[in-house]
């Protein structure tokens, strides 16, 4: 064999071996795509990203949470549930009930607190909007910074157990036959509960009398005693007496049935285009440093995700849903428009603030 043929044979052999190698590689599974964390360089030149340490030493003492409603109500229940599990840098919270003037006294205490994170407000978004629009609160919701929302407490239409009304349609029928005679009571005057009630009456086409009470406990007592025909309160405030057989739930305010009242229809099920609930939100005074707000939000999320807290508050009648500060701000913007419509329905005028 001459030298030329030897060289040609060597070249062919090398090409064949390379082709075999590429074919073998083509039959192997593809290497897994690295996750963003795996793909990120972690050399000394570009260190891996870490959560920044707080630059503020907060808190250094107990945090006070103002609930502008009486003990035993739905917001008080939420606050004391958080109190049992809250632990931010070894510090906890204490709930203080500051009542009066349909929540105005406690709410204004929260608004005028020092913006240092040591005095917060726990109340309903709808309470602030409705009472601000009505002029009962000398402030607007823009005077506060939302920290986080932990859930909502829907409204229940109920009657005492000896009432002749067995269904919500019984109430509607009697009210239509006796216009202006039905007494329908709940907590607060010219606030969220009254606005919702008047929206229900308007959508159904009935006339009724709103009977306001200073708090849910007083309204519930009146309902249990048969002093009002219909009691309109929160799920938390009525769950115990309904389960105990002392009152009968006729309808729910939110469009989907609740696990708390599995046999009670919603107003939407009954053909009435209506929904409404009170959303429990923690607020800080305006100008509170956002780093403190973020720390509080993170701790409230941790509490919310604690199964013991979640089950306890859900068991008291709340529907659980967490919204962070940004999500709460977006919700407030939408709810503001709806509440303005309810205010106009109640008063015949558009609100000038709120």
Image (cartoon, grey):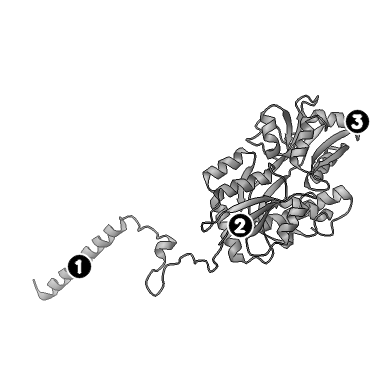
Q: Disc number at residue 237?
A: none
Within 10 Å of the Cα at label 3, are there few (<14), some (14-19), or many (20+) other Cα atoms? few
Residue 105 versus residue 156: which sits nearer the camera?
105
Assign the N terminus to one quadrant of the image. Answer: bottom left
Q: Position of residue 141 (x, y in %)?
A: 74, 58
For label 2, the SS is strand
The image quadrant where one finds the C terminus is bottom right
Specify the quadrant of the image occupied by residue 38: bottom left
> Which residue position holds label 1?
14
Q: Residues within 10 Å of mark 1 (few under 14, many from 20)?
A: few
Q: Find the distance from the CA under tag 2 to the CA under tag 1.
A: 78 Å
Q: Is residue 184 left or right of residue 26?
A: right
Which of pointers 3 and 2 lies earlier in the amino acid sequence?
2
Disc 2 crowd rating (10 Å Cα; few below 14, some 14-19, many 20+) is some
How far apart are the alpha carbons under marks 1 and 3? 102 Å
User: How far apart are labels 3 and 2 at the CA level?
Assistant: 52 Å
Question: Foreground residue, 61 or 222?
Answer: 61
Residue identified by numbered label 2: 63
* Secondary structure at numbered mark 1: helix
Residue 116 image-quadrant placement:
bottom right
Q: Nearer the viewer, mark 3 or mark 2?
A: 2
- Which residue is depicted at the point 83% across and 53% down? 134
Name the side, left or right, on which 26 lies relative to 315. Answer: left
Task: Report the number of numbered marks.
Answer: 3
Q: Which mark is residue 178?
A: 3
Q: Does label 2 or label 1 sit earlier along the sequence?
A: 1
Residue 317: x and y, percent?
Answer: 65, 39
Front-most of residues 301 and 223? 223
Q: What residue do we see at 42% from left, 60% from top?
A: 35
Q: Position of residue 148 (x, y in %)?
A: 63, 55
């Amino acid at each position: 064999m001459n030298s030329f043929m030897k060289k040609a044979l060597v070249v062919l052999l090398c090409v064949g071996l390379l082709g075999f190698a590429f074919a073998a590689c083509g039959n192997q599974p593809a290497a897994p795509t690295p996750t963003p964390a795996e793909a990120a360089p972690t050399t000394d030149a570009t260190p891996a990203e870490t959560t920044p340490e707080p630059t503020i030493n907060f808190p250094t003492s107990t945090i006070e949470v103002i609930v502008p409603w009486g003990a035993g109500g739905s917001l008080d229940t939420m606050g004391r549930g958080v109190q049992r599990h809250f632990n931010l840098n070894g510090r906890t919270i204490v709930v203080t009930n500051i009542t009066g003037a349909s929540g105005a006294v406690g709410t204004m205490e929260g608004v005028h607190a020092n913006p240092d994170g040591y005095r917060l407000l726990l109340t309903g978004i709808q309470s602030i909007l409705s009472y601000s629009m009505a002029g009962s609160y000398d402030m607007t919701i823009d005077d506060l910074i939302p920290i986080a929302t932990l859930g909502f407490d829907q409204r229940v239409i109920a009657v005492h157990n000896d009432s002749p009304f067995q269904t919500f349609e019984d109430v509607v029928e009697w009210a239509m036959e006796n216009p202006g005679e039905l007494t329908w009571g709940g907590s607060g005057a010219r606030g969220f509960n009254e606005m919702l009630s008047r929206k229900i009456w308007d959508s159904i086409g009935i006339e009724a009398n709103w009977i306001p009470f200073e708090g849910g406990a007083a309204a519930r007592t009146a309902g249990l005693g048969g002093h009002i025909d219909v009691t309109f309160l929160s799920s938390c405030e009525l769950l115990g007496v309904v389960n105990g057989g002392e009152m009968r739930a006729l309808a729910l305010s939110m469009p989907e049935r609740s696990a708390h009242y599995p046999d009670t229809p919603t107003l939407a099920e009954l053909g009435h285009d209506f929904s409404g609930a009170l959303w429990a939100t923690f607020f800080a005074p305006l100008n509170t440093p956002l780093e403190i707000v973020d720390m509080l939000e993170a701790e409230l999320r941790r509490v919310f995700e604690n199964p013991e807290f979640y089950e306890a508050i859900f068991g008291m009648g709340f529907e659980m849903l967490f919204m962070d500060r940004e999500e709460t701000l977006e919700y407030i913007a939408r709810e503001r428009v709806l509440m303005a419509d309810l205010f106009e329905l109640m008063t015949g005028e558009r609100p000038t603030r709120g």
